[in-house]
Image (cartoon, rainbow, N blue to C red):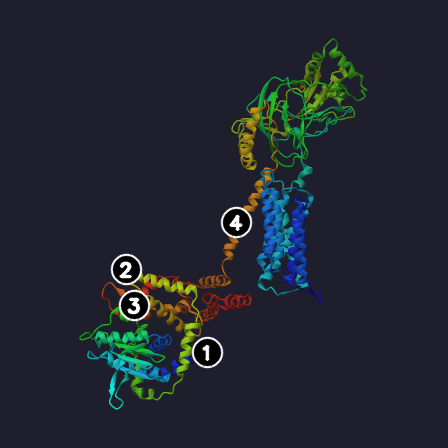
Amino acid sequence: MKTRLNSEIKIESFIKILSYLVGLIGFVSIYRFVDLIFLLTFISLFIISIVLDAKQISITKTWLINLFSLLLIAFALTNINLNDPVKPLVESLLVLLAIKFLDKKSAKDYMQICLLSVLIFTGSALFSLSIEFAFYLMMLILLLSLTFLTLTFFSEDRKLILKISLIKSLVIKSLIVSLITIPLTLLLFLILPRSSFPLLSFLSRETALTGFSDSIQLGKVSNIQTDDSVIMRVNIKQIEPTRLYWRGIVLTNFDGTKWSNINSENLPQQLSKIQGEVINYTIYLEPYYNKYLFFLDIPFFKSLGKITILADLTAQLDETINRRIKYEAISIIVDKYNEENLDKSKYLQLPEIKDKRLIEKVTELTTNKNDEQSALAIMNFLKNYKYSLKNLPISSSPLEDFLFTYKYGNCEYFASAMAVMLRIKGIPSRIIGGYKGGRYNNIGKYYVITQKDAHVWVEAYLDNVGWVRFDPTPPIIDSSNDIFSVLYKLRIFFDTINYYWNAMVINYDFSKQMQIVNNIRHTLKKSYVDLVNIREFSQYILFFLLTILTLTTIILLRKKIKRKTPSERILNEFLYKLKKLGYTKNKNEGLEEFAQKITNSHIRDDALIFIKNLESFIYKDKEMSTSDYKRLKSLLRNIKEK
Amino acid sequence: MLSKNQAIDTIINYLSNYLHGKTKALRLSLITFFSKGHLLIEDLPGLGKTTLAIAIAKSFGLQLGRIQCTSDLLPSDITGLSIYNKALGTFEFHKGPIFNNIVLVDEINRATPKTQSALLEVMGEKQVTIEGKTYKMNKPFFVIATQNPIEQFGTFPLPESQLDRFTMKISIGYGSRLDEMQILKSGSKREELYHLEPILNKDDILVIQQEIQDKVYLSEKVLNYILDIVEATRNNKFCIGGISTRGILAISSTAKAKAYFSGRDFVIPEDIKELAEYTIPHRIIFKEELDTLTKKEIVLSLIEKISVPV
């Protein structure tokens, strides 16, 4: 890259530098995800191109490199499979980009470099959406706008010398373009219906609000239970809502104000003796920025993969759920199950109890009763308390305040009180967090579970029976949604549309058929169905394919337009201009013949001059150079009424 | 590039002084001449055909021969014949008037078919075989034939197959009132024409003819345009027979010559279009007997339907 006098630079060199930067961004965004061979191929070809450009050598025998690259692409494409079609595609694109660097000559080639980089960059979004992505995106937008601006100069005159001042103004212009573009894009994201593709989800991660969390601090939950936003939709047959407990997390450790989770053993469970109704269902879980998955109590698990299944019958993903996911599951609706070899001590942990009234109360309720009777007594005692979401007792001893002073609270108080009282009695207990119930959508045949359905309940371990579910919270009188109101019906209707969109469009993927076949085989072999395939990739793939399709269409259209030679283009401009001036050429007229008919003598003479200059390119098949084109352009500009 | 096209403009300007109102006819004649073709002028007598021929011959310094056709004209009157030379005791070939550079054949339709075909054969082959011996025509060789469109009695109209041998068929027409006023004022300039100084010599003419043939470019677009026209005449409801292959060659060679005259080394569609009324109608065999004007109109309307390549 030779600069002249430090204040001027050849436009070709400038474009080259820009194109290398653009290519580099594409590469950097993707390099962590591609195989070593493609990495090395790209890097070596990239460096070779830079060296060749620096020494101003152009290689003539590119066929060898092309052949090698084609082989690499073929190799990459043979690796395409249903699970991960993106990687081979991105790898092939990387090789294409590297080749493109070797023989870049015209403005078209630089355009293709930009295009390939954008494609690769889009591909990178499918692998990871980290904060770097945003950074690269900004850089890419900036560089691309600068490149396109410069290319307009370049296509006019390849030999142009750019002054530093001009470059500065170009940079400023493209900065402005980028600065305008980025907020507008953000605005679009707010206005447009939310797509399932979380391109900028990291921006909203902190603000995500859910009725569900890893731990329960008494009284800290504010107005979540009035939040109508949907957490999940479940495609399931209609069941009495009071029987629906959506299990999410098990909390075992209480410190007086807060329940938290001691890491549960990662053990495959031994469930063999459960009898009950078997339910198959599909859950569409909204992104809620935690990793717990919800299942109808009590779930069966089999598949492992990306899911960690805990011994307490909960499951979680290895990463946060920041996009809508779909999973299928199977459950048996019972309120008890047995767990063998239970370490009871873990479920008897209690903080130091200062208030003797609590112990007295437990004694009073459970004297001369076996475990089951005691549990029922405690639950019935708590059922007399009132349910409230306002003015909750918040103090260092919220439980005692709830029991003996306020006598009202939300489900967390009820469940905590019961679990603690059970532990005082010596019955192992724990708190289960999740959702309860849901509203059935008759049109779509699915349950909608919203944030305000968030719920906690208690499981007590009774000898010879196992874990038994107790829900001490008194029934909530829900009057917020009058099911007869028009608004409510409208909401149901829109939710149904939303549901079908997610179920049929967003989550559709071509491996579905394969899975159905597999599932049938599994079902036949075994008596249980596993949790199948969290398809987080399906929506990305759809997006990626759509992008590629769109861009290919654009390229093809561009090629079609490009097929017009410069002489045809300028002729069309000429004819258009004269049409505007009121002279239309008939199909059966020759150009000179047409011009001779022009009544305005100024226009006629100028048009004739133009035509005489243009004719040799049309009828002599002469190649039109840039200077010819410019000359004709200026002649064309000359044509006007005087 | 084109070396002599300036000279052609000079000639046309120069001769226009002698041929009042015949500039167009002169131009068409020269196009035919330089495209190595032959010209048929269909016109009433006394409109300046002979003057035109003399002017062309003299301005190029070429020999002019003239044949006045009558029904008793024999082929040998045109080609020449062998006569016994007593002194040498051998037959000597005496060249006929056809052995000139420019031959004016007046009222060709009055000659008998036998004579006509002998003449047309010479035009096509540019050589003549008499008593087993072949004689080449001079170069350049240009025949200007005339025929009277009105007189029908005792004539033998040329059949279409014979007409096809003429590259162009033109008519001079009456001069304008202004032109004829000019002629009246200054009198006929026929005499002066005989004393014209040649502007180009024979070699120059051959060079120009060769340049037109070799150096003027006919792009595929324009070739397709020609073939479109040809096809249209062949599939037309008024026509039995369309343009022949010889006709196609005539169209392209005249178009090249016209391009050359305009200072271009490539043919544009207008070159073809503007000459079409002279190069095409006489080659087409129409279903009905039509007069010249109607033929021309049909051909032109045909061409108007064909889109011009740009």
Q: Nearer the viewer, residue A16 or B218?
A: B218
Look at mark 1 in the image and give the residue it sits on: B3
Q: Quadrant of residue A400?
A: top right
Q: Residues within 10 Å of mark 4 (few under 14, many from 20)?
A: few
Residue type for callout 3 = Arg
State the SS at label 1.
Answer: loop
Same-chain check, marks 1 and 3: yes
Q: Residues within 10 Å of mark 3 (few under 14, many from 20)?
A: many
Give the Cα separation between the discs numbered 3 and 2: 16 Å
- At 34% from the left and 74% from the top, the residue drawn is B37
Look at mark 3 in the image and give the residue it sits on: B283
Look at mark 2 in the image and give the residue it sits on: B237
Look at mark 4 in the image and give the residue it sits on: A553
Chain designation of label 1: B
Residue A89, position as x, y percentages in the image:
59, 45
Mark nearer the viewer, 2 or 1: 1
- A197 is higher (above) or lower (below) than A113: above
Give the Cα separation between the discs numbered 2 and 1: 45 Å
Mark 3 or mark 2: whose residue is earlier in sequence:
2
Q: Quadrant of residue B207?
A: bottom left
